[in-house]
Every structure is written in C-alpha cells, then in structure tokens.
C-alpha cells in the first residue's frame, strides 16, 4: 500500500485560492522590469535642456559671422552683415510673403514624404522577406539612394513638364530608397524566434508583418523615415530651384533662385536660413520625440 506524501499535502492544503499563481500578473511584472523607469523632468527643464544648446551654438555662429564681417575680409555683396540678413527676413514677414512661401514648400514636402512612406513600406517588406526580389533590386535601391536628387529634375521636367507632378516625382525618387533601406535594415535585426513564434501562433504573412515584423523593426524603420524626410526636403529644394514656373507657385527654392538672379546676397542667405530652419524644426519637433519614445520603450534610454 503506497504511503501518502506527507511533505506536499500540508502545503497544498494551506494554499488558498487567493494564493494561486496568476501567470498574467507575473508576465506583466516581468514586462515592467524590462521597461526602464521614466523620470520625467519638469516641462521648463526639458525645454531648457533641449533648446539651450542649439541656441548657444547659433549665438556662437552669429558672433563668428559678425567678427568676419567687421574685419571686412570680403566685400559686402559677398558677406553681408547678420543684421542685413535679419532685416531681409523681417521684410518677408512684414510683407506677408513668409507664410505663403513656407506653406508652398512645406506642404509639398509633407505630402510627398507621406506618399513615399506609403509606397516604400510594402516594397521594403517585399525586399526584406523575398530573397529573389532582394537579390534582384536590393543593389539597385542602394544605388538610387546614392544618386543626387538633382539628377532627376531634368528627366522629370521632360516627363511631366513644369507641373506639380514633376516636384512630387523628384521627391518620391529621392526619399523612397531611404525608407526601403531603413525598413530592410530594421527587419534584418529582428530575432528569428519572433517570426517563428508568430507562425506557431497561426500568424500569416500579412498579419505577421503587421503585428510582428513592423513593430519589432520600428527603430530601423523610423531611422529610414527620418533619412527619407531629409532626402525629400533636399529633393524638393533641388526641384524648386530648377523647375520654376508661375503654375508651380513660389516656394523657398524659387525665393532662393530669385535672390540669386538679382545678386541679392542677404536674400540668398535669408532663404538658406529658412530652409535650414524648417529642416531642423521638423527633426526636433517630430522625429526626435518619436525616436526618444521608441528607444525608451525598448530600454535604450542611454541612446537618447
């Protein structure tokens, strides 16, 4: 006759329903341990720490510029004073030309970039997951990324004429390869066990790409989108500089070209500063917070 297990019976009898192991709570606790605690500083301190270094750098740059102008190393029409460029920007604001010019360029860049992301995302998934496609078009996409966007402008003008389609075609050709390469690089860094686990749980190709691959590849995908935005902005400026027409309106590129035509160096530098200001603002206000949040969620707080 087998003897009863005297060591286990008292323990099981003493364990009530409230003490049963809750696997869901255990899993949530482990996830919480993986996520680093986020210590949010006050808003004023975050704004100060984020804006003060760039402002100091700009102040130093203006100081060097002012010193060079005061030394009169170059004639005035080559190196105007910072105050003259500031007066040019002030005139643009007072005349009401600033906002239409900024909006003309900015809405083209944003719309072209969004179309590029919509086109590049499925293409990137295809290139990353199908070996034949990757072997066939992967080197071509990398080569297109290194091709200067300004090279597409003459071809786009011949294809579409001096129309907005030309502008958007140049923006797409400039930014799509960067988004594809970023997404492919992000998918290459996804651990294979995640895709196998998804397949074991019944995820198909589309649902696996949506719920597993894209979320896991998000850091690389965002880096590709960030680079794609930079290329789309640069491509837009190249297209606006070369393809000028009343039908296209006046953007920052046309403003820069008009100032060059009139030998207006303060106007040229003012347009360059506005182009730089838009690029830096989009990076600081859109991509930098997204990047910080994604990296923090993955425990990479030291990278931001």
Image (cartoon, rainbow, N blue to C red):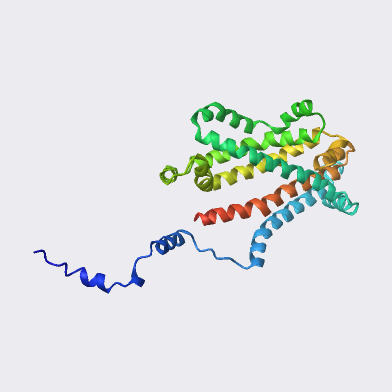
Residue 243 seen in this snapshot: yes
Q: Residue 218 at x, y = what percent?
A: 55, 47
Please, is residue 260 above or below residue 68 in the view?
above
- At x 34%, y 68%, the residue is 20
Say above or below: 80 vs 242. Answer: below
On the image, the x and y values in percent for residue 14 come to 27, 74
Foreground: 42 or 118?
118
Say whether residue 225 is left or right of residue 135: right
285 vs 120: above or below = below
Q: Which of 79 and 68 is in front in this view?
A: 79
Q: Is residue 185 above or below residue 17?
A: above
Q: Where is residue 94 in the image (x, y as percent from the top left)?
A: 90, 54
In this image, 99 relative to 206: left or right? right
Residue 78 in view: no
Find residue 162 and report its image quarter.
top right
Q: Quadrant of the N terminus?
A: bottom left
């Amino acid at each position: 006759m087998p003897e009863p297990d005297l060591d286990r019976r008292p323990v099981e009898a003493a364990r009530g329903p409230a003490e049963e192991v809750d696997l869901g709570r255990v899993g949530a606790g482990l996830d919480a341990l993986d996520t680093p605690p986020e210590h949010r500083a006050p808003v004023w301190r975050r704004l100060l720490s984020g804006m003060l270094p760039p402002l100091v750098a700009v102040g130093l740059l203006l100081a060097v510029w002012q010193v060079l102008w005061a030394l009169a190393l170059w004639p005035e029409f080559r190196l105007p004073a910072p105050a003259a460029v500031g007066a040019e920007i002030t005139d643009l604001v007072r005349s009401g030309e600033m906002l239409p010019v900024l909006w003309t360029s900015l809405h083209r860049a944003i719309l072209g970039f969004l179309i590029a992301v919509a086109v590049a995302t499925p293409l990137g998934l295809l290139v990353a997951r199908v070996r034949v496609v990757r072997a066939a078009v992967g080197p071509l996409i990398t080569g297109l990324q290194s091709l200067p966007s300004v090279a597409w402008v003459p071809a786009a003008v011949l294809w579409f004429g001096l129309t907005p389609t030309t502008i958007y075609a140049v923006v797409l050709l400039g930014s799509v390869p960067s988004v594809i390469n970023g997404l492919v690089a992000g998918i290459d860094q996804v651990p294979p066990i995640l895709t196998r686990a998804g397949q074991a749980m019944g995820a198909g190709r589309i649902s696996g790409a949506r719920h597993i691959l894209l979320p896991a590849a998000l850091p690389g995908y965002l880096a590709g989108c960030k680079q794609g935005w930079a290329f789309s902005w640069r491509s837009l400026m190249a297209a606006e500089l070369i393809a000028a027409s009343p039908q296209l309106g006046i953007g920052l590129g046309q403003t820069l070209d008009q100032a060059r035509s009139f030998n207006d160096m303060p106007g040229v530098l003012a347009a360059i500063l506005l182009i730089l200001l838009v690029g830096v603002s989009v990076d600081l206000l859109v991509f930098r917070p997204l990047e910080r949040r994604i990296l923090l969620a993955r425990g990479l707080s030291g990278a931001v």
